[in-house]
Amino acid sequence: MTQILVSVMTIIFVNVQILPTDAKIVEGSVWAPNSNFHFLSRFCFQEGNDATLEYEIRYPESFCLRGENGIYQSGCQKLVLYYDEKDQWDFVYKNDKVECQDKLDPNLLHYSQIINLDPMKHEPGEEIDSLYKYSMFVSGCWLTKREDTNASEIACRAKRNFLSQRDRWWFVALVNCETDKGLKLDYFHLEFKNGDSYNKHFSVDEWYIMETTFVLLYLFIILLIACIVFTIKLKNMGFYHITFKLFTLSLLLKVISYLLYAWAYLKYRTGYESIRIKNLALGFSMLAHIFLIFLVILMAKGYTITRAKLSTKGTFKVMLFIIIFTLIYFVSFVYHVNVFDPGEVLYFYESPPGYTTLGLQILSSFMISYGVFFTVKRYPEKLKFYLPFYVFYSAWILVTPIFAIFSIFVLQDFYRQKIVYGVEGGLSFLSYGFFLILTFPTRANKNFPYHIKTNQIDILEITETGNFPHDPDGQSESSYASSAASGETVTVSVSSRSAETNFIDVFRVDYDMVDPNNRRE
């Protein structure tokens, strides 16, 4: 299992390294030889008239056709601005039934939504800034020469203001229906702004995500500090089991993911967002979730709580599920990084991998229910721990798909991302915090799950079943742990059968050898 996770993490790093850098200041080039329609970027502008798009573009003059009189007409490339209505972007994007000319239908688009990138007259010596000053009414393009090859090219620099009655998604596409040469931009720079505030480069659907990220980061750092304190106490008490180690690893990965998210969103304030950093953060977050699901399933089956090892059949089922779970999450990550189309899908759970991960979440809840049922049936004295454990974690696992469905069908597209991000982060914080409450190493905690120490598990693992003895005299697990820590001598009998003989191994654990200060307080 460890080797699989290491391999997955390695591939995540490789995928992250080959990703391009994208942002709300979008820069790059385009070469689409067999296309006359190419999606460039999208942005959710705020309500009002403070939203702007500034662009700079350079492309070869040969991609702008002249008319018979030598004047550039409609044969030049165009920037076309579509908004989020069914008869606009949804109608034209990846719709093979719509001809190219229909995507520029004047009955569909307002005249200001089409920016003809044809050069206007540029007098020698005229300052480019003077052209830019009046570019709200023109394309802001002029004919010039490349400095490296002296080839003719068309350069454009202009700005557009957006007036909207509500928060609205806008999609920018490059279009040219008059040529079969395809589309080409040697360079383009698109800068989207929502006003002039500190978060002006954030799309409306991303407002407050940076603030939410820092709040969650601080909260998870507090949990990590508490986890370190618990680790020290549990080690001294002898209850630092592998399940708590899994929890610590998962929590550490979660903190790393939020550190990376915080870094990415701080860079975003300048307009440049590193998709590499955000996807690396997503990879760490996915691994943290996988470890947490693995931990919850193991504890549901009683591992380190009522048994030292799972049965062969149980081990096979758990490992098979976790391997499938990990692979599906890995495929989802690769899909999100390399296939996910922001022009077509605005929400991860609207994609095939998203549906698959939701299905796995629901399946994991059944595995937890199955494991808890039989564990409590064999060890009814553990009901004090498993009742809150089951109620919380089964609800936590099912809330994610329920909320995802709610988000898809109820929430507006321009509110969805920030709401989902905050809710999922909050639920994640609760899942880690509740585990620390259940394992709080104090005498007052009646839900403390462990009653067998780590040195006893090593011996129990060699038995046939690996099951722990019940609490002596039917006492609760916490009272057993307290008596053990108080220096009493406890005798534990373990029965084991071999293929040839039946015998009883009795081993004695003398707690007088244990430091009396190492007790659960």
Image (cartoon, helix red, strand yellow):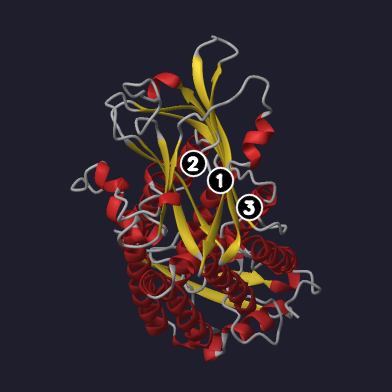
Label 1 environment density (alpha carbons within 10 Å; few <14, some 14–19, many ≥20):
many
Instruction: Tell me if I can see residue 62 in this picture.
Output: yes
The type of residue carrying mark 1 is Leu
Q: Which residue is mark 1?
A: 280
Find numbered disc 3 in the image and state the secondary structure of the residue it sits on: loop
Q: CA distance from mark 2 to mark 3?
A: 28 Å
Q: CA distance from mark 1 to mark 3?
A: 22 Å
Direction front: furthest residue: 69
In the shown orientation, is residue 360 left or right of residue 209? Answer: left
In the shown orientation, is residue 213 left or right of residue 468? Answer: right
Q: Which residue is mark 3?
A: 201
* Residue at screen point 56% across, 15% down: 146
The type of residue carrying mark 2 is Ile
Q: Is residue 344 above or below residue 12?
A: below
The type of residue carrying mark 3 is His
Residue 4, by quadrant, is top left
Q: Which residue is mark 2?
A: 12
Percent across and percent down for residue 160 are 55, 49
Label 3 environment density (alpha carbons within 10 Å; few <14, some 14–19, many ≥20):
many
Q: Which numbered disc covers residue 297?
A: none
